[in-house]
Image (cartoon, grey):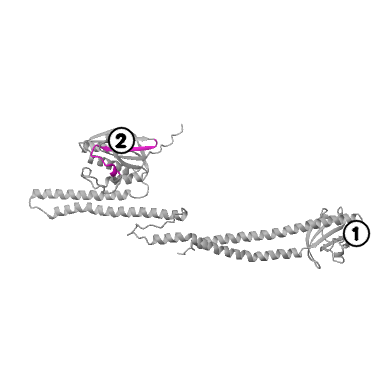
Amino acid sequence: MRRRPSVRMRITAIATAGIAVTLGAAGFWLTNDTAERQISEVDAQLRSDAVVTQRFIRSRDPVPDFGPTGRVVQVVDADGTVIGSNEESEGDAPLLPASFPWKDHPEGIATTVHHPELGRMRAWTMPLEGRSAPWIVVGRSTEQLHRSTQSLRATLYVVVPLLTVVLGVLIWLVVGRALRPVERIRASVSEITERDLSQRVAASGTGDEVDRLAATMNEMLARLEHAATRERRLVADASHELRSPLAAARALIESRPADTAERERNDAMALEALARLQGLVDQLLELARHDRPDAPPSRPVDLDELALQHADVLRRTTDLAIDTRRVSGGQVMGSEEALGRMVENLAANAARHARHQVTFTVHEDDGRVEVVVADDGPGIESDQREAVFERFTRLDEARARAGAGLGLAIVARIVERHGGTVRATAGPGATGAAIVVDLPAAVPADPLPT
């Protein structure tokens, strides 16, 4: 795989190229603008001289002599022959050829010519009267202007590349200094291993982008550390939970009593231990399935029907009083299987801890659906109401008579995947416990047009 240049190199290259183009364009504009301004000044002076010459000749005065100014003044007849000139240009060849379109510019026009004797010249021509000969031609050498323009251009040819190189080196140093904290963060993170996630990246405290990157990295490391700790605790708790039924089943199988009745009771106890083991494995698999980050299948699910269904199961399988008077309509979007498991776990948890009654509540309000399953058991202490949703969490003996502590953890994962929240509170009348699930209601379909 081809390795891309470093960020420092790319930034420096792009910035240097931009500077080179900008300086080159600026130098080109400066050179042309300076030359055009100088030529415009020359043209204005030549036009003024031509008007003065025209006025002198019309008044029957000789061609004016402008002194040692380097100006050439010529009066040319229709065939291009010089019929008058000032002292400085006496004997010089005509500035403009006979084929020049004299008549096309009665107001006068400036042009650049290359005179064989005088070199590069700027000339202004205008008719003496109307559109006919003779013509007035006033010229001035532009060799010095041309040399100054060329000198400026040559200077820019040296200055622009040199300045580009200097700025490129400066950008390289500045970018390197700016990226140095990022490299320190990378080096710090590279030293952190999965065996020790307690290390953190040193933040500068400046509040800039690099400091926020360090803070984000530390937050990510904290989440990874929490996840790793949770997974290690899961392995330890699962091993502990699996050990008991496995040891019991093995002991019962190894101790085969001779008495038939005793052996049958022994086998029944072994099967019960294996069933408990299988139930724990099933719950672990269920928890792993709902721990996935992807969203569950989405379809309309009636939570009131699920609540009534599992309430009816408790009526048929327990001696508890089941209250469903507060169950009303409530529809959400999600997986019917997962939401059914959620209500089933809530019902099983309440029945396991209830003394006499389990109460189901479902209602929809302001775009939210709330499901509450409450029992009249021993309740949950306020400082333990968040811990009950962790894996293998068991409270006091009154609420830990059965189960492995995975039911509510599965509920929490299902609710999280459906974009809701779950919390534990006191039951009705401040007795027992209530698990409250809050989910977004299903968006109603647009009514058909009538």
Of callouts 2 and 1, the N-terminal one: 1
User: For mark 2, what is the residue?
Assistant: 361
Q: Secondary structure at mark 1?
A: loop
Crowding near the residue tagged with mark 2, few <14, some 14–19, many ≥20 C-alpha atoms within 10 Å:
some
Q: Quadrant of residue 88?
A: bottom right
Residue 375 part of the magenta segment: yes
Q: For residue 260, which numbered disc appears in the image?
A: none
Mark 2 vs mark 1, CA separation in Å: 119 Å
Q: Quadrant of residue 298?
A: top left
What percent of the width, then of the height, locates residue 114?
78, 65
In the displayed structure, 241 sits above or below 444; it is: below
What percent of the width, then of the height, locates residue 443?
40, 38
In the displayed structure, 306 sits above or below 178; it is: above
In the drawing, does residue 83 fall left or right of residue 370?
right
Numbered disc in front, either 2 or 1: 1
Closer to the camera in the image, 266 or 398 = 398
Residue that extends furthest to the left in the rendered view of this protein: 259
Residue 303 part of the magenta segment: no
Crowding near the residue tagged with mark 1, few <14, some 14–19, many ≥20 C-alpha atoms within 10 Å:
few
In the drawing, does residue 122 fall left or right of residue 198?
right
What percent of the width, then of the height, locates residue 285?
28, 50
Q: Tag 1: residue type?
A: Pro
Q: For residue 62, which numbered disc appears in the image?
A: 1
Please report the residue visible at 40 percent of the width from the left and 55 percent of the height from the top. 217
Q: Secondary structure at mark 2?
A: strand
Closer to the camera in the image, 331 or 121 = 121
Q: Tag 2: residue type?
A: Thr
Residue contact between numbered discs 2 and 1, judged by CB atoms under 8 Å: no
In the drawing, does residue 159 fall left or right of residue 147?
left
Quadrant location, the N terminus: bottom left
- Magenta stretch, residue numbers: 366-385
Closer to the camera in the image, 70 or 205 = 205
